[in-house]
Amino acid sequence: MIMTKQIACSASLFLLAFLPGVRGVSTPSDDTPAYSSDGNLLAPSHYREWIYLTSGIDMSYTASNAMPDHSMFDNVFVNPTSYRSFITTGTWPDKTTLVLEVRGAENPVSINKHGHTQSTELMGIEIHAKDHGSWSFYDLSDGGPVAKRIPRPASCYTCHEAHAAVDTTFVQFYPTLLPLATQKKTLSAGYLKDIHEVTSVPQPSAQ
Ligand code: HEC
């Protein structure tokens, strides 16, 4: 009897491992980017089960510039297969997808009197995906099943390529990844130049 149970259990584990997306579980085979026939990205539906990298609040490059009265959080997630690869290499493999989710920052709510909490309202989703060695940005602000490809030239590409710490992604703001990239020496020339400029500002001499 015990034997039979063990066999049944192993059989279902085997099935779970090979059926993509069973009950929303992210398996290595279901976290790669997929596309519509016109080259847009199919929205990764369970990115909320991916690896959490950071939250930024009121970062000035976001739409919060245009709406100074509104405070916003952004949350960044990456597909688990690529995260595991980053841990060993310090950079992103092909088929990496990063999702930036924007939510309103609220105050006061419930018992909270100070600081901000995140709203249930989703204000936008932007996606950065690497395929065949090159990165593309996609916009999912309409909340539909397909994220629209943002063509070059666009400020997204310019800023990320000039200032992002690893392979056009802003690893300098992803606290669990920055030490790994530093250790593996995968930091970009643009990022190293930026921090050099900040740290080499002449200091007033002590009298
Ligand atoms: C002026 C610089 C700048 C511009 C322009 C910019 N970004 Fe970003 N982007 C950032 C920073 C900084 C972060 C890190 C966010 C954080 O730490 O929460 C980021 C993070 C992201 C991420 C998370 C993954 C990653 O690559 O690190 C996505 C997706 C993203 N941006 C999409 C876009 C899109 C789409 C556009 C254009 C519509 C855009 N960005 C324009 C600076 C920029």
Image (tube, grey):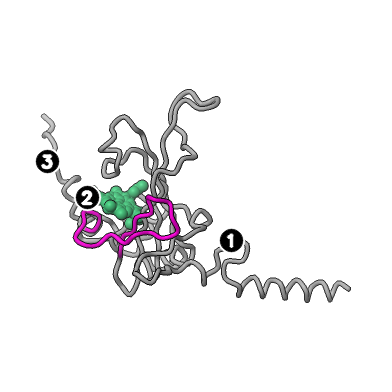
> Judging from the image, what secondary structure is the residue with disc 3 in?
loop
User: Which residue appears at 18% of the width and 54% of the height?
Assistant: 193
Q: Which residue is mark 2?
A: 195
Q: Start and end of the magenta stretch?
A: 136-157
Residue 54 x, y percent position in the rendering: 41, 48
Of the residues tagged 2 and 3, which is closer to the observer? 2
Q: Which residue is mark 3?
A: 202
| Residue 13, image quadrant | bottom right
Query: What is the C-alpha distance between the residues marked 1 and 3?
Result: 53 Å
> Can residue 35 be seen at all in this image of the molecule?
yes
Amino acid found under the numbered disc labelled 1: Gly
Q: Is residue 96 above or below residue 54?
A: below
User: Which residue appears at 29% of the width and 42% of the height?
Assistant: 63
Residue 172 x, y percent position in the rendering: 32, 52
Amino acid found under the numbered disc labelled 3: Pro
Q: Which residue is mark 1?
A: 24
